[in-house]
Image (spheres, grey):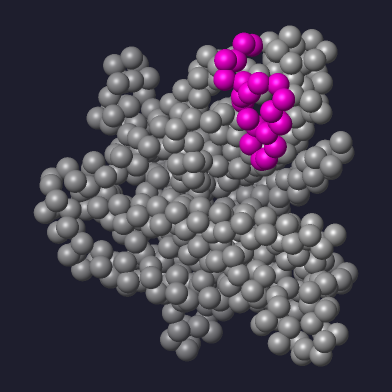
């Protein structure tokens, strides 16, 4: 494949490399190859349109949150966090994430391991079932737990008899959060583990490693970035979930309000500065999530590149 | 394996089946009665139309964003690329109040559009905007990898045969992107149908006019009308599962097309 000659190019791109330079390969098309690029001015129109769209859609709302929070100055902003209900909601959110994330992590790893490394009938059904919470509306996700654990629910009378509160109490929120974030680790790990194949584990077994040893020393290090990625996503969703938690929590202030619920309460009471202040905390969470996501993605790319080079060297 | 199945059943399957079982307790007449109630029907119509509109707009603009991110270089490209995931990472309640603040009468964009007669907050238009916001990453992230893997050689061949960029786009690139685009749009649609947090602030929740289906479920619950809430939830679940199935099929189609060359 030779570099395109200028007689075929539809646009005179003064920046195109002289013939004789190798074409650029890689994941992103290099627009300096004139023959297959739009005219530069048209590119800039598209770029501006896309950037404008993103700015209007994404950045303006973000800025509004911060502007609203700082409307009465920094003092009012930091004072919002002195409110005991807000502080409680922050603590509750953290506790819920601390419970839901490890549980779903364990399940995710177990499920992906079973699905990726073994063959069994009904594998496809299992994978689809794992995806279920993703497709369900958050409100419905909360509703189903109310149906079971609520006063009129299946377990309702039994729970009341034993004075155990699930709905309108923290355990209900934990359950609903687990449901919502359930698929996240598994969805990340399954394709990853499937693409890694079974050879390394089989090699370890033939060398005499036991099941647990194989898992700990061979499987886990391979999937560590996938796990990290899944944990980041699960955590973000667990802390930020609104609809499902709204249904099961009953909005009881000081007892069952998470941070997103607290934002809603403050907003509905016209405490705008406090609401936006709490919202900025969640924005920071989102930023940290995005940064962590980008970092992990880069590491995964690097690891994959290393593997491909090693495989090529062995070939 | 055993752990997997137990966990799965306990957390997911049993609660989900509760919806159907409870709904069946209503009896067919009761069920239909709730569903044909005008308020519920209006809510379904609203949810459907706004979700579909938002998904389609996301399809067009998501394609634009994905195209620009993959094919062009410009300052800030990497930053914008990460920001595309913002609606995914941002809690829905925050998105809800942020969008309401922007588009209400004294918001930055709302105050500009209202004198022109375009009211956004507390109208279906506002709902659609919120749904566009949360659906953005679905289209972009589904189309991006396919766009990145597109075969340059086919485009170069077409150019050398005399095709101009528009022809190449319409006849070569768009058909190649169709499966992933369809998948992304369906994902955005599915998400938009069930979306609650981002929408309830900007919608105003006026019955018959700006009430979405998740909200109806919510208000029925608050009135302790468990039967009604369950009936509506039943339909939502059926819709969700069908969409999930359709999306899985679409993804298979997309996977097949990518390897078909």
Horizontal arrangement in the rendering, residue A194 relative to residue A34 (left or right):
right
Indicate whether A61 appears above or below B90: above
Q: Name the residue located 59 percent from the left edge and 65 percent from the top edge.
A: A225
Indicate whether B184 appears above or below A19: below
Q: Name the residue located 17 percent from the left edge and 53 percent from the top edge.
A: A77
Q: Say which of A224 and A146 sits in front.
A: A224
Q: Is residue A22 magenta?
A: yes
Q: Is residue B12 visible?
A: no
Q: Which residues are magenta?
A: A11-32
Residue A151 in the image, given as x and y percentages of width and height: 49, 73
Indicate whether A296 appears above or below B4: above
Residue A78 in the image, given as x and y percentages of width and height: 17, 58
Q: Name the residue located 68 percent from the left edge and 40 percent from the top edge.
A: A26
Residue B56 in the image, given as x and y percentages of width and height: 61, 29
- Image quarter (top left, top right, bottom left or bottom right) of the C terminus of chain A: bottom right
- Image quarter (top left, top right, bottom left or bottom right) of the N terminus of chain A: top right
Q: Say which of A54 and B113 sits in front.
A: A54
Locate residue A113: give its quadrant.
Answer: bottom right
Horizontal arrangement in the rendering, residue A136 relative to residue B95 (left or right):
right
């Amino acid at each position: 494949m030779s570099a395109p000659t200028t007689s075929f190019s539809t646009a005179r791109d003064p920046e195109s490399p002289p013939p004789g330079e190798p074409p650029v390969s890689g994941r992103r098309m290099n627009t300096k190859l004139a023959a297959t690029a739009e005219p530069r001015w048209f590119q800039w129109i598209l770029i501006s349109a896309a950037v404008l769209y993103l700015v209007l859609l994404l950045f303006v709302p973000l800025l509004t949150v911060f502007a609203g929070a700082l409307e009465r100055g920094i003092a009012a902003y930091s004072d919002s966090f002195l409110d005991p209900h807000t502080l409680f909601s922050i603590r509750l959110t953290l506790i819920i994430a601390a419970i839901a994330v490890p549980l779903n992590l364990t399940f995710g790893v177990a499920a992906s391991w079973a699905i990726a490394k073994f063959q069994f009938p009904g594998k496809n059904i299992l994978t689809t079932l794992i995806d279920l919470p993703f497709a369900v509306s958050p409100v419905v996700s909360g509703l189903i737990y109310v149906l079971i654990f609520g006063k009129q629910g299946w377990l309702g009378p039994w729970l009341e008899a034993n004075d155990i509160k699930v709905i309108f109490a923290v355990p209900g929120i934990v359950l609903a959060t687990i449901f919502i974030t359930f698929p996240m680790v598994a969805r990340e790990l399954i394709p990853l583990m499937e693409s890694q194949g079974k050879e390394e584990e089989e090699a370890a077994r033939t060398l005499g490693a036991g099941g647990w040893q194989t898992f700990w020393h061979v499987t886990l290090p391979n999937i560590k970035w996938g796990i990290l990625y899944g944990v980041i996503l699960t955590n973000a969703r667990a802390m930020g979930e609104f609809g499902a938690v709204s249904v099961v929590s009953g909005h009881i202030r000081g007892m069952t309000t998470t941070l997103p619920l607290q934002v809603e309460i403050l907003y509905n009471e016209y405490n705008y500065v406090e609401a936006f202040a709490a919202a900025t905390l969640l924005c920071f969470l989102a930023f940290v999530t995005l940064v962590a996501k980008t970092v992990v993605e880069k590491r995964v790319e690097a690891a994959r590149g290393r593997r491909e080079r090693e495989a090529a060297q062995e070939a | 394996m055993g752990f997997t199945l137990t966990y799965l059943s306990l957390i997911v399957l049993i609660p989900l089946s509760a919806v159907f079982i409870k709904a069946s307790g209503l009896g067919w007449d009761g069920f239909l009665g709730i569903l044909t109630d005008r308020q519920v029907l209006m809510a379904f119509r609203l949810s459907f139309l706004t979700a579909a509109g938002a998904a389609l707009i996301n399809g067009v603009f998501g394609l634009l964003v994905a195209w620009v991110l993959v094919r062009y270089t410009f300052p800030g490209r990497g930053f914008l690329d990460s920001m595309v995931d913002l609606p995914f990472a941002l809690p829905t309640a925050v998105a809800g109040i942020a969008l309401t603040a922007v588009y209400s009468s004294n918001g930055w964009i709302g105050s500009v559009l209202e004198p022109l007669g375009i009211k956004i907050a507390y109208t279906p238009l506002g709902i659609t905007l919120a749904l566009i916001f949360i659906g953005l990453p679905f289209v972009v992230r589904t189309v991006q990898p396919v766009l990145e893997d597109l075969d340059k050689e086919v485009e170069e061949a077409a150019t050398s045969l005399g095709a101009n960029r528009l022809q190449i786009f319409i006849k070569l690139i768009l058909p190649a992107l169709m499966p992933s685009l369809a998948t992304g749009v369906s994902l955005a649609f599915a998400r938009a149908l069930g979306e609650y947090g981002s929408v309830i602030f900007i919608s105003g929740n006026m019955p018959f006019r700006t009430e979405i289906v998740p909200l109806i479920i919510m208000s029925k619950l608050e009135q302790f009308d468990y039967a009604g809430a369950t009936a509506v939830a039943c339909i939502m679940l059926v819709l969700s599962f069908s969409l999930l199935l359709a999306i899985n099929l679409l993804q298979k189609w997309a996977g097949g097309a990518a390897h078909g060359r």
